[in-house]
Amino acid sequence: MEESLRGLHALMIVCLVCSSRLSYVWAHGDGLVDQPLSKIGVHNIVVELDDSVSVNAYPPILGLEGQDTEWVTVNIEHPNPDKNDWVGVFSPAKFDGSTCWPSGDPKKQSPYVCTAPIKYKFATDSNSGYTKTGKSCLKFQLINQRADFAFALFSGGIWNPKLVAISNKISFSNPKAPLYPRLAQGKSWDEMTVTWTSGYNIDEAVPFVEWARDGEPSKQSPAGTLTFDKNSMCGGPARSVGWRDPGFIHTSFLKDLWPNTVYTYRVAHRLCNNEIVWGKNYTFKSSPFPGEDSLQRVIIFGDMGKAERDGSNEYSNYQPGSLNTTDQLIKDLRNYDIVFHIGDITYSNGYLSQWDQFTAQVEPIAATVPYMIASGNHERDWPNSGSFYDGEDSGGECGVPAETMFFVPAENRAKFWYKTDYGMFRFCIADSEHDWREGTEQYKFIEECLSTVDRRKQPWLIFSAHRPLGYSSNQWYGEEGSFEEPMGRESLQNLWQKYRVDIAFYGHVHNYERTCPVYQSKCVNEEKHHYRGALGATIHIVVGGAGAHLSPFSKVIPRWSIYRDYDWGFVKLTAFNHSSLLLEYKKSSDGKVYDAFTITRDYRDILACVKDGCPATTSAS
Ligand SMILES: [Fe+2]
């Protein structure tokens, strides 16, 4: 089993490198490629500790200079090495059965291990001669995750592991340190929210944010604290081997901000003895006033996930484009103002530790610009949990970590739809994992969001949802003949048309595709690159290729499909003023623009009649 798994992954890499056609075998919009941690047979672990085997990790104390990320060296010596030997990183370091839930039956013995590692590597990863020498030196990159770490050596492969040795414990100097701040727009344009994670509950320390406008005295704003426990997970692995304590998640609301103004901030906890534990210093720029005429730049993508910079977990091959996208965005941080990650955030799929890895990966971005998320199937879907789809894609998380770890300005964060204004933009973010059809609560919200914007001040009206509710010529939508998420646009297209939505963005399908301005599957505008005057209908864009395995297109190319790219990438929208908008699609591999269009128009063009979008008394045809 183990050998065949490793063989399959080797084949996968060869396929990806040599032939995009063959890699289709592995590609599925939502991951026939499994979460690597789910391949570990935690329930099969047997203990055969062997004194002749050694595992040593150093340095013993990490983060002595305040770092939250450190490289660790793990030396292995095994007198009977095997190519399937592997090392798992466990945290907390005490990962034996004492951390398991009691079985309830005193006669039944708990398993020795009941939690998955945070990540793993094969002993041969750094030394192919390991099978002869029995020696290997592995490098792991660890992040501060509120607990100590131990490295465990297993033989027998990952599905039937035998635990043969456990390393010394290592730890960050302050495991509880406040970390990984992420910004999000508040409910009003002049409010920024800061959310972060720590090991401090409120009875131990008071969380707050210290912030200041350049040259002014600093203020302190209090933060609320949330967490969740295993009982709030809907099923396994989130409720079983994938569970890991998420720590405490704090959110502070910085209010009455001046528009378009740079602020500095740092998160903090005041301990009982009045000592303060500080986070790092960051800066952000506040939102423009709604309607303000200034340069406004937006990044949009879906399905990024995370990957391990140390090559752990199947060569980091679960979301192969994730680090490229993250690194391009970090490099270009000065050239955009807000990010929308429209669902399928971490692909933790019930392995809770991965939320920390994700927030650490995006920290340079999310701590500097608002990082707005939408809910996807990998955040929310679970049978009998109220999700619109009964799949198991959330791995039992049923939305709880996503709703807690990231702030969104929704009325009810368990219903993940919200509106947010950014200068000349109005964003209506829908939740495709809850029913959106006419007559539903969400439909009412969407109409309210679209109808309440003053287009003279905010001309650029954007709709977004995780699943392609509009148009996609992805292979399986083509096979279904729907070219959309079934039931997707049936009721919504009337709203898009009536309220003249400019662009609709989707993820879920892991590629890039742009349509013409399209209504009822027909292009209403023949222009492809420089739209002038009334658009006539909405342009639909799938931008789900930020990280996860790519999704193939159908062989049929519908007439409404203007540009398709089977590659990883993201979109940048630039509003230069009320009359001029630029969209660019960039590949994650090189950050260069591969598709682009402009919209140039005046207010009267938005008011102009469009098909089925005008009162019956007009002469619209
Ligand atoms: Fe998805």
Image (cartoon, helix red, strand yellow):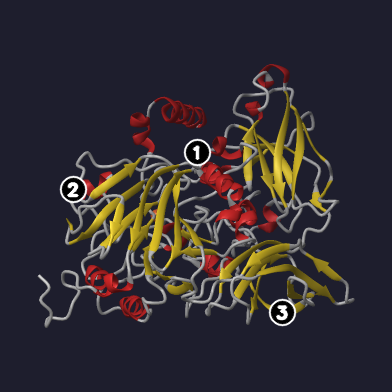
Q: CA distance from mark 2 to mark 3?
A: 53 Å
Residue shown at the point (45%, 25%) measured from the top left: 14
Secondary structure at badge 3 equals strand
Q: Nearer the viewer, residue 106 or 199?
A: 199
Q: Specify the amino acid type for callout 3.
A: Ser
Residue shown at the point (37%, 63%) measured from the top left: 465
**Residue designated by label 3:** 221
Can residue 109 be seen at all in this image of the molecule?
no
Instruction: Report the disc number at residue 559.
Output: 2
With 312 as the anchor, is 290 left or right in this view?
left
Point out residue 388 in the picture as x, y percentages from the top left corner.
Answer: 34, 67
Can residue 199 be seen at all in this image of the molecule?
yes
Point out residue 362 in the picture as x, y percentages from the top left corner.
Answer: 60, 54
Query: Which label lies toward us, 2 or 3?
Result: 2
With 574 as the anchor, is 97 left or right in this view?
right
Q: Nearer the viewer, residue 109 or 107?
A: 109
Would you place residue 255 above or below residue 552 in this image?
A: below
Point out residue 454 in the picture as x, y percentages from the top left corner.
Answer: 38, 80
Identify the mark nearer the N-term, 2 or 3: 3
Q: Specify the amino acid type for callout 2.
A: Arg
**Residue designated by label 1:** 589
Secondary structure at badge 1 equals loop
Point out residue 357 in the picture as x, y percentages from the top left corner.
Answer: 62, 52
Dot 2 surroundings within 10 Å: few (below 14), some, or many (20 or more)?
few
Q: CA distance from mark 1 to mark 3?
A: 40 Å
Q: Quadrant of ligand 1?
A: bottom left
Residue shown at the point (26%, 73%) measured from the top left: 495
With 250 as the anchor, is 220 left or right in this view?
right
